Image (spheres, helix red, strand yellow):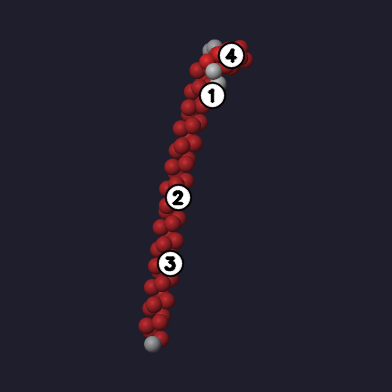
Amino acid sequence: MGPSVQQLLIVLLIIVLLFGAKKIPELAKGLGKGIKSFKSEMETDDKKAENIEKVEEKKEEVITATKVDETTKSA
């Protein structure tokens, strides 16, 4: 089970005491930017992985075509 409402309020109170009420929005904003940046980097990595797969497929096609070409020339 998850934390109760009382537990969440206690944690929130401790955070306010540690950082101050003015600092919390800045922390949340920074956290949001960090998450957005992380998602952006993950999408970039996915696109890079797709491009690598395409290059590997093309490389295999070229190797296969070259082997077929060499076989037909030697026959």
**Residue at x 55%, y 21% (from the top left corner):** 3
> Which secondary structure, mark 2?
helix
User: Would residue 12 be visible to someone looking at this image?
Assistant: no
| Numbered circle sitting on residue 60 | 3
Three-letter code, disc 2:
Lys
Residue 61 image position (x, y, % from top left): 39, 67
Front tag of 4 and 1: 1
Q: CA distance from mark 4 to mark 3?
A: 60 Å
Residue 18 image position (x, y, % from top left): 62, 15
Residue at numbered disc 2: 48
| Numbered circle sitting on residue 29 | none
Please state the total of marks drawn on the protein image: 4
For mark 3, does the 10 Å Cα neighbourhood hold few (<14), some (14 to 19), or many (20 or more) residues?
few
Three-letter code, disc 1:
Gly
Answer with left or right where residue 47 lies relative to residue 34: left
Three-letter code, disc 4:
Ile
The reply to whether callout 3 and callout 1 are in contact (CB within 8 Å) is no
| Numbered circle sitting on residue 10 | 4
